[in-house]
Image (cartoon, rainbow, N blue to C red):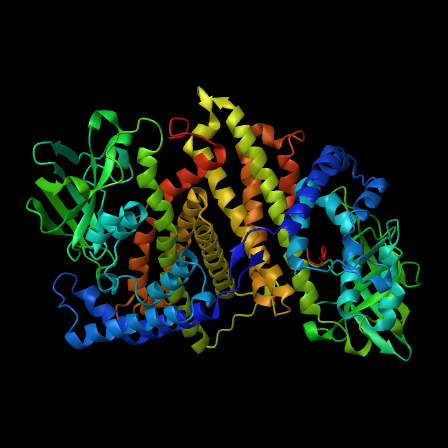
Amino acid sequence: MIDFEIAPLTKEIVQTIETFGRSFSRKKARYYDEYEHEHEGLKPDEIKAVQEYQLGILKKMQESKKDREKPSLSGVITGEARSWGDQALLSGAVRMGLGNAAINAVATDDQKKRFGRLFAAMAITEPCCGSDTASIQTTAKLDEATNEWIINGEKIFVTSGHKCEAVVVWASLDRSKGRPAIKSFVVEKTRPGCTVTKLEKKLGIRASDTAAIVLEDCRIPYDNILGTPEIQEKKGGFRGVMATFDATRPGVAASAVGIAKAALDFTKEKLEAEGYTFPYDRGIHSLSAVQRDMMDMEANLDTARLLIWRAAALMDQRQRNSKEASMAKAKAGRSATLVCQKCVLLMGPLGYSREWLLEKWMRDCKITDLYEGTGQINTLIVARQILGFSRDQLK
Amino acid sequence: MAEFTLDEEQQQIQDMMRKFAQNELRQIARDCDEEDKLPPELLNKVWELGFTHNAIEEKYGGYELGRSAVTSAIAVEELAWGDVSLAIACLAPMTMMVPILEFGTDEQKEEWLPKFCGESFYAATSALMEPRVTFDPVALQTTVEMSGDSLILNGKKCMVPLADQAEQILVYATTAKGAGPASVEAIIVDRDTPGLEVGQREKNMGLKPLPLFPVTFTNCEVPKDRRVGGDRGINYMRLLNLSRANLCAMAVGVARASNEYAIGYAKERVAFGEPIASRQAIAFMLAESAIEVDGMRLLAWRAAWRLDRHEDATRDAALAKMYCAEQAMKVVDYGVQILGGHGYIREHPVEMWFRNGRGFATMEGLAIG
C-alpha cells in the first residue's frame, strides 16, 4: 500500500519535541555555539527540564503502542523534529551515540548487559583515513596470555568523544588482510591507554564535542569485540560493520532535513511578515524569483524527506536498504545544505548576523553532507548498486 | 502508517502495464516518432486494458472496480515508460471522462459515461492549454458566456489531443477573465458544432506520434446542459491537480526509461580501457538520475495519495509538477549526454526521450487519472 499518513501519536510527539525545541534548545543554542569549549554544562534545573521532557515522550510512546509507526520510521520523523529545534544541543543529553547503534546491531546478550547502559560514541576516522575506512591503521592484537585485546592507534572526529562513556573503535586484526580483518571493539573510556587528546574547533554543531582519542597499548577484555573475531575472507566481515551505516544514514539524513526546515520555516515567516505571499496555484511566469526559490526549496526538502522515510520503512520491514539509505543521505545532505545557504541569502544582512540562529543553522547543516559518508561517497554507493559494480569496477 | 510498497493488486497492474508497454509500445515507438504516426489499432488495444471501464459504475455499464489516483499513477508510469506520446493519445478519453465522473450531474453521467464503457475506443478529449508564451492554467483566456439556454465559447486552445477524430471535446473556459480557478467551467462540445474549428495538426519538438491540434472557438454556441456539473460547476483545481499527478507519473516513466538505457549503455561502452560506467563522472550522473527518479515518484505518489483522500492537493501537486518537470529534463538530458555523439542520433531512443521530456514543464491537463 502507498500511504503517507503519520500516526497521530507520532504527530503528538513531534509537537512536544518542537515545543521543547522552541522553548529550550533554541534559547540556549547561541550560547553553546559562541562558547564551544568554554560553555558551562546544563544547570541542575535545566537537566531536570530535559529529563522531564524525555520522560514525557517515553510515557507517551508506552501509552499506545499500536498507534505508532515502527521504530525506524518514527525515529526519522522525530529525529527531524529534534534537529529542527537544534541539531547538537541535546546530543549529550540523549546519551545515545552512534556507538550504541553499532552495539545494538550485533551485541550478544552478555554484551548488551555490560554495554547497554553506556553512552557509546563511534570511532572510525583517523588522520589518514575518513572515506577510505578500509585503510585504517589502528590495530588490535590478541594477548593470548591474558585474553585481552591490545588496541593501538589514533582516532579523530569522534562525535561526543568527550561526553561519552565508551567508544566503539574500528581496528584491524591484521592489516595485511584488508577489509575482512577490520572489527569493532568496545573501549570503555576509563581503560588505561585510552586518552582524549584534543577537542576540535568546528564550523558548526559546536554544542556537540568532537574529539581525538589516542589508544596506546589500551587493553580490553576479549569479550569486548563486537561480532566474530574470525577473519572471513569472503564478504561478510566488512559488510557487517558497513551495515550499521544503512541503519544510521537515514537518521543523519533526517537531521539534515530538520535543520533545513528550521531555516526554511524561519525564512518564510520573515518574508511573509514583509508582505510576501507564497501561492501554489500560479503559473511560472507570475512567480517572483523569491516565490520560485521557495517552491524549489520546499520541493527538494520534501523529496529528501520522502526518500528518508522510504529507507526507514525498508529497515522496519527488515529488508536491505543500502541503496535507499545512501540515496536518502546523498539527497538530503546536498539539498539541505543548499536550502540553508539560500535562506541566508534571502534574509539579507540580518541573515548573515549572529543575532538570529539562521546563520548557525547554515553552519550546522554543512556537516550533514560530510559525516556518515560524504555526499560523494553515498552517490558512489548508489552508483555501484544501480550498476551492479564492485569496488574494483567503479572507484 | 507511512508505507511505500505496492499491494498485490497494484503489483499486478504494474506487471500488466509493464508487459503491455514492452510488447506494444516500445516496439513501435521510434517508427511512430519518425512518421508522426498513431496506429489506430493501438487505441483499441489500450481501450481493452479497461482504464475507463474500471472507473465507471456498473449502472452506467462499467466494471466499477474503483478509482485511485495512486493506482493510476502506477499504471501510467509504465505506459509512459513504454512511450509517453502513444500513452497520452490512448488515454485522451480519460480527460473527458474524469471531470464527468467527478462533477457531472446525474443526467450528464447517464448520457456520457456509457460511451466510455463500449467495446471500442470512444474518441473523446479535452482542451485546456492556450497558445501564449505566458500561458497559466489558472488564468485562462478562453471564455464561456451564458446566453439564455446556450453557452457561447470564444477563444483559442492548443495541444488538444486527437481533436481531428474526437466526437466530443471537453473545453475549459472561464466565465470571467482574471477571476481565477473558481470561474472555470468545463463544457462538452461536439466537434462538428458551428463555431468550432480544428486547425492544422501541430508540429512539436516531441510527442510526435501524438496528434495535437489547435482548436478555435468563435461564438461557438452549445446547449446549457453541456456545462459539466450544471450550476454547481466543477472544482477546477482538483481536476488540474489530478492531471498534474498523472503527468508527474509519466515524467517518472520517461526519466526511468532514459536512465535505465543510459545505465545499460554505460556498462557496455568502452573508453580508455574500461566501461565508461567505471568513471565517476558518468557513474555520478547515473546515480543522481536514479535518486531523482525515485524522489520524483514519491512526490507524485504523495500528490496522488492526497487526491485519493479528497484533500486539497494544490500544494503537493504544484510542487510535484514543478519538481518532476525539472528533474525529468535533467535525467533525460543526462541520458543523451552519457551516450555522447550516439545519443544525438535518431537511433538510440534517448534523443526522443529528451525531446519528449521537455514537454512535462509545458503540458497541463493532458492526462487525468
Q: Residue at x 39, y 49 (%)?
A: A329
Which residue occupies the foreground of this view, A197 or B190? A197
**Residue A94 placement: quadrant:** bottom left
A146 up-or-down from B207: above or below: above
Q: Position of residue A165 (x, y in %)?
A: 16, 55
Q: Is residue B357 above or below residue A32?
A: above
Q: Quadrant of residue B203?
A: top right
Extreme-left residue of the structure:
A192
Above or below residue A125? Residue A310 is below
Residue occupying the point 20% across, 69% down: A31
Residue drawn at (13%, 33%) of the image: A142
Residue B248: percent from left, percent from top: 62, 53
Q: Does A309 sit left or right of A371 as displayed? A: right
Give x and y (percent) for residue B54: 77, 56
With respect to residue B366, does B233 lie above or below? below
Q: Residue furthest top?
A: B273
Quadrant into which the C terminus of chain B falls: bottom right
Task: Note whether residue A36 is visible.
Answer: yes
In this rendering, position of residue A301 left or right of residue A204: right
Q: Quadrant of residue B126?
A: bottom right
Can I make out residue B360 in this image?
A: no
Extreme residue in the front direction: A110
Q: Is residue B258 left or right of residue B284?
A: right
Query: Residue A8, how many percent across, how many down?
Result: 47, 70
- Residue drawn at (84%, 72%) of the image: B106
